[in-house]
Image (cartoon, helix red, strand yellow):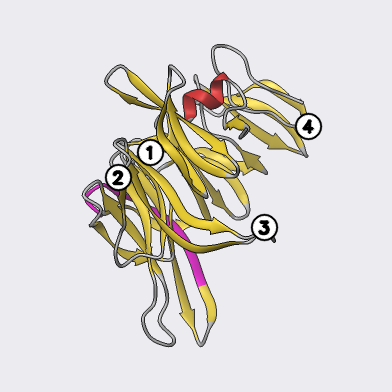
């Protein structure tokens, strides 16, 4: 008898890996290393037949077809999107795909000739390009914006590597001028300047100076930050509200945060 392992580690993991369909939610399962989906009653809705599966979002789950060899190697790989009705949809012209966020998913178009580079853009739920690939990397959309990376290369040497943000129309609304960039959360996004992390607003203005070694996104008005190897918390004004003293710290939820 096949052993079914639910791909759920906690109730938080369940919440992350579900998609509402009317009154129904789909949950991923793993059977003999293959992914499928059940509903909240435990009934199998999509049989396990994919070697990789992700959470449903905007009506799609990013999945990967293929088969396992006895050696543990996966072959005959084909990535696409699964509808909630179990229909597999291919996406043409892209070799790497992401999960959907706010109606858009990151997608990479491969280079076609020698010395041409793969570039990232975004597809919409019709599975065609909504923002033409023009970047070296992109992030997921969050609060209407997504970070993008632009590199300048001369004779195979990277002479500039900067990050900015685009809106859903593909407009570069925050110019590429940061060393690194993260997703927006509660109106703020973390960026790197001179090797340190700080936060900008949606206009691209630095509102919390880059003085931290590492940071996590804001949640319920607080963000975990690392100073001198220790983690603490700041508020949206950049004031320290919990002194750095933890070896690790995660985002707050329902008034509590996981720390070590």
Indicate the secondary structure of the residue bearing disc 3. loop
Query: Contact (CB < 8 A) between labels 1 and 2?
Result: no
Instruction: Single out the mark in the foreground, 4 or 3.
Output: 3
Q: Position of residue 174 (x, y in %)?
A: 35, 51
Q: Which residue is mark 3?
A: 72
Residue 78 located left or right of residue 51 = left
Mark 1–mark 4 Cα distance, whole angstroms, equals 28 Å
Residue that protrudes farthest toward the top in the picture: 255
Mark closer to the chain start, 3 or 1: 3
Give the number of the disc on residue 87. 2
Q: Nearer the viewer, residue 62 or 213?
A: 62
Mark 1–mark 2 Cα distance, whole angstroms, equals 27 Å
Mark closer to the chain start, 4 or 3: 3
Residue interval drawn in magenta: 160-170
Q: Which residue is mark 1?
A: 142
Mark closer to the chain start, 2 or 4: 2
- Per the picture, the main secondary structure of the magenta-coloured stretch is strand
Q: Position of residue 21 (x, y in %)?
A: 30, 25
């Amino acid at each position: 008898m096949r052993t079914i392992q639910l791909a759920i580690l906690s109730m938080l993991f369940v919440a992350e890996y579900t998609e509402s369909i009317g009154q129904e939610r789909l949950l991923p399962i793993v059977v003999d290393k293959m992914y499928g989906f059940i509903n909240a009653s435990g009934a199998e809705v999509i049989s396990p037949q994919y070697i990789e599966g992700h959470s449903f979002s905007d009506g799609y789950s990013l999945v990967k077809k293929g088969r396992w060899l006895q050696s543990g190697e996966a072959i005959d790989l084909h990535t696409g999107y699964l509808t909630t009705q179990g229909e597999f949809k291919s996406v043409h012209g892209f070799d790497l795909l992401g999960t959907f966020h706010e109606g858009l998913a990151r997608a990479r178009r491969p280079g076609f000739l020698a010395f041409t580079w793969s570039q990232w853009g975004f597809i919409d739920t019709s599975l065609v390009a909504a923002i033409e690939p023009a970047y070296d990397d992109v992030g997921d959309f969050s609060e209407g914006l997504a970070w993008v990376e632009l590199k300048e290369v001369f004779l195979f040497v990277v002479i500039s590597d900067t990050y900015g943000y685009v809106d859903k129309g593909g407009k570069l609304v925050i110019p590429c001028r940061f060393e690194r960039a993260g997703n927006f959360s509660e109106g703020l996004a973390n960026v790197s300047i001179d090797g340190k992390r700080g936060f900008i607003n949606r206009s691209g203005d630095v509102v919390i100076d880059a003085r931290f070694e590492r940071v996590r996104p804001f949640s319920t008005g607080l963000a975990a930050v690392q100073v001198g190897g220790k983690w603490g918390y700041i508020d949206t004004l950049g004031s320290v509200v919990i002194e750095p003293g933890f070896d690790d710290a995660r985002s707050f939820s329902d008034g509590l945060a996981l720390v070590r």
